[in-house]
Amino acid sequence: RTWFRMGYVGFELSFAEKIIQANPSMKVVDLSEGLDLIAHGRDNTGRLTGADPHIWLSPALVKKMASVMRDQLIEISPAKKLEYEENFQKFVREIDETDAEIRRLLNGYEGRQFITFHPSLSYFARDYGLVQLSIQQGGKEPTPAHIARLVDAAESENIRTIYIQSDFDRENARMFANEIRGEVVQVWPLNPAWSENLVNLAQMLSDNFQ
């Protein structure tokens, strides 16, 4: 058995020890290992103590993770190497097509800012040269000073959209949207239709940048 972990997802961190104890022979592969992660904290030695978990929202990182999974699967079942390689190459084509479409939609918007309630789009923003401003910081409620800075940024950049990732964000996001005379738009980072979801996100951002 092999468990492919995303690395810093909350439920994984909470249950990892119990899962491993219940399956002592299971191999654990951390797909975030070796990736250029966006740090949430570091210890005195510079090692990560926390990182943004939303690595699947970066096509560039997804390609690296898929490569690791292919290699691990081939190691487990060498007889299926050709099948795994063919499926990997098929997925790489999908990733490249997705990336190209996103770049087409966001062409000319490099450096543009957008506001989220929870900072779930950091890797997506980094990939495509955008600047994510987040109402929440470190999972905590924003300070009045932070809200004031975001309102100023929204006014100066003519931002009229707040992106949220769940209904739980909606009320606080709506209050902020009222401050900037804007609207709340919901995104779904965990949408299993991965490629379609990222392209739709790019389209949404493009429409609101205009």
Image (tube, rainbow, N blue to C red):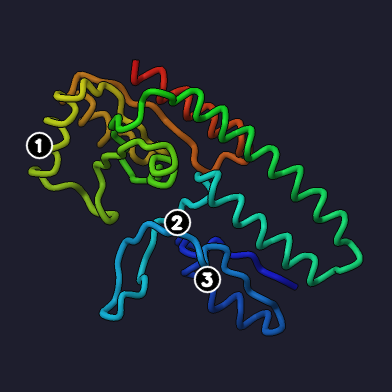
Question: Residue visible at 30% across and 33% down?
Answer: 111
Whether pointer 1 and pointer 3 mark residues with C-beta atoms closer than 8 Å, the reply is no
Residue 10 placement (x, y as % from top left): 45, 61
Say what amino acid the circle numbered 3 marks. Phe
* Residue named by callout 2: 53
Q: CA distance from mark 2 to mark 1?
A: 27 Å
* Residue named by callout 1: 148
Residue 26 as seen in the image, left or right of residue 171 = right
Question: Residue visible at 10% across and 36% down?
Answer: 148
Say what amino acid the circle numbered 2 marks. Pro
Residues packed near mark 1 inside 10 Å, few (<14), some (14 to 19) or many (20 plus): few
Please give the label number shown on residue 57. Answer: none
In the rendered structure, which disc, 2 or 1, sits on the residue that comes first in sequence?
Answer: 2
Residue 51 placement (x, y as % from top left): 39, 61
Q: Residue furthest right?
A: 79
* Residue named by callout 3: 15
Above/below status of 79 relative to 91: below
Residue 40 placement (x, y as % from top left): 32, 61
Secondary structure of the residue carrying tag 2 is: loop
Whether pointer 2 and pointer 3 mark residues with C-beta atoms closer than 8 Å, the reply is no
Q: Nearer the viewer, mark 1 or mark 3?
A: 1
Residue 185 as seen in the image, left or right of residue 200 = left
Dividing the picture into quarters, in which one does residue 95 lie? Answer: top right
Above/below status of 27 relative to 195: below
Dividing the picture into quarters, in which one does residue 30 lie? Answer: bottom right
Above/below status of 117 relative to 51: above
Residue 167 as seen in the image, left or right of residue 98 = left
Q: Residue furthest top?
A: 210
